[in-house]
Amino acid sequence: MARVLLITNPAAARTSSAAFGVVVRRFQAAGWDLEEAKTAGPGDARRFAADAVAGGGIDVVAVLGGDGTAIQAASGLVGSGVALGLVPGGTGNLLAGNLRVPTTPLAATELILRGRTRAVDLGRLDRDDGVHYFGVACGDGAAADVMSETPTQAKRRWGIGGYFTTLFRVLPTIRAAPRTITVDGRILVHDAATVLVLNCGEVVPPWVRARFDTRLDDGVLDVVAVQASSPLECARGVARVLWNAAVGEVADTAYLVYARGREVTVAADPVQPVQYDGERAGWTPFTATVVPRAIRVCAPEARGR
């Protein structure tokens, strides 16, 4: 009999009792041995997943929640071979979207039951408080402010649109600052308002991409640095990033720099806030390294992502 640990985050935007009931009943109908765990604070999902692996006999750790809960659970599974199952229940669910996991609880659970998995990379951040992983992206500056400062209430009410309320608030304050970006030993010096280090290419799956050539299983991280010091320059930079991704280009400009590598270090003067998958992670400098094929995830077959 297959065993699954179902981790839920009651505070996630779309994690309702109805969704939870759908998932539980489907696992039970399939004859799976189901254990349940609910998060109550930061780090719970990682601890639950790690404990399940240590206890042995678990086949899947399923997460009903958002990207934050998903990456915490994934962090407890690195190198274990135990599969991560994603049931989207958060604001953006960007990792699930990039993997083309179905958006409804029942369809996502059916995917887990089918047992098809694929190996994916994770990014790793070593910070003063320990090791953190990211599945989607990490970064600094303006993007970090928007991702980490959007209130939970706004995300629950507006979904991914909640991030735009924060963007409009911080937009007038965005300023470029000097960055030193080191990629596999190659040093790039560039003024930027934000530096993104991507493990996933799509920022609004499947419609909006930051880079057309980013894959979850290519063993590298992709960098996009945007220079902007006004709302107009922000619009110009974002538009160029989206245009390049849409037409399949990776082309530097005076206000846009691309890079790719296995290890990326970013330093800024003055220091800038840092985030990973929407979670705050202190201040620059930071170093991100790729962990190839770090976990296995229940997902459809890869199709060019």
Image (cartoon, rainbow, N blue to C red):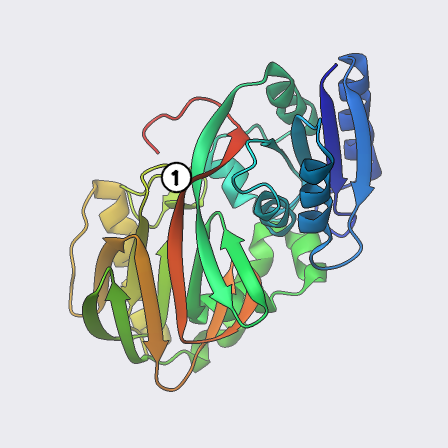
Q: Find residue 191 and report its horizontal and vertical position in percent.
A: 26, 77
Q: Amino acid at mark 1?
A: Leu
Q: Find residue 280 and report its horizontal and vertical position in percent.
A: 57, 67
Would residue 56 appear left or right of 144 to someone viewing this image?
right
Mark 1 residue element: loop
Q: How many C-alpha atoms fall within 10 Å of the one at disc 1: few (<14), some, or many (≥20)?
A: many
Query: Looking at the figure, which quarter contains the C terminus?
Result: top left
Q: Looking at the picture, tell me which residue is in the foreground, 16 or 199.
A: 199
Would residue 148 appear left or right of 38 to someone viewing this image?
left
Question: Vertically, is 301 above or below 266?
Answer: above
Question: Vertically, is 181 above or below 61?
Answer: below
Rendering quarter of residue 132: bottom right
Q: Find residue 138 and report its horizontal and vertical position in percent.
A: 44, 59
Query: Looking at the figure, which quarter contains the N terminus?
Result: top right
Q: Residue furthest bottom?
A: 270
Q: Looking at the picture, tell me which residue is in the foreground, 187 or 111.
A: 187
Seen at 81% across and 31% down, the residue is 35
Residue for badge 1: 216
Asked whether residue 197 is in view, the answer is yes
Q: Looking at the picture, tell me which residue is in the foreground, 304 or 242.
A: 304
Question: Vertically, is 192 above or below 277?
Answer: below
Q: Find residue 94 and report its horizontal and vertical position in percent.
A: 51, 44
Rendering quarter of residue 187: bottom left
Seen at 58% across and 48% down, the residue is 75
Seen at 23% across and 58% down, the residue is 258
Seen at 54% across and 68% down, the residue is 281
Asked whether residue 167 is in view, the answer is no
Would residue 129 appear left or right of 180 to someone viewing this image?
right
Total numbered labels: 1
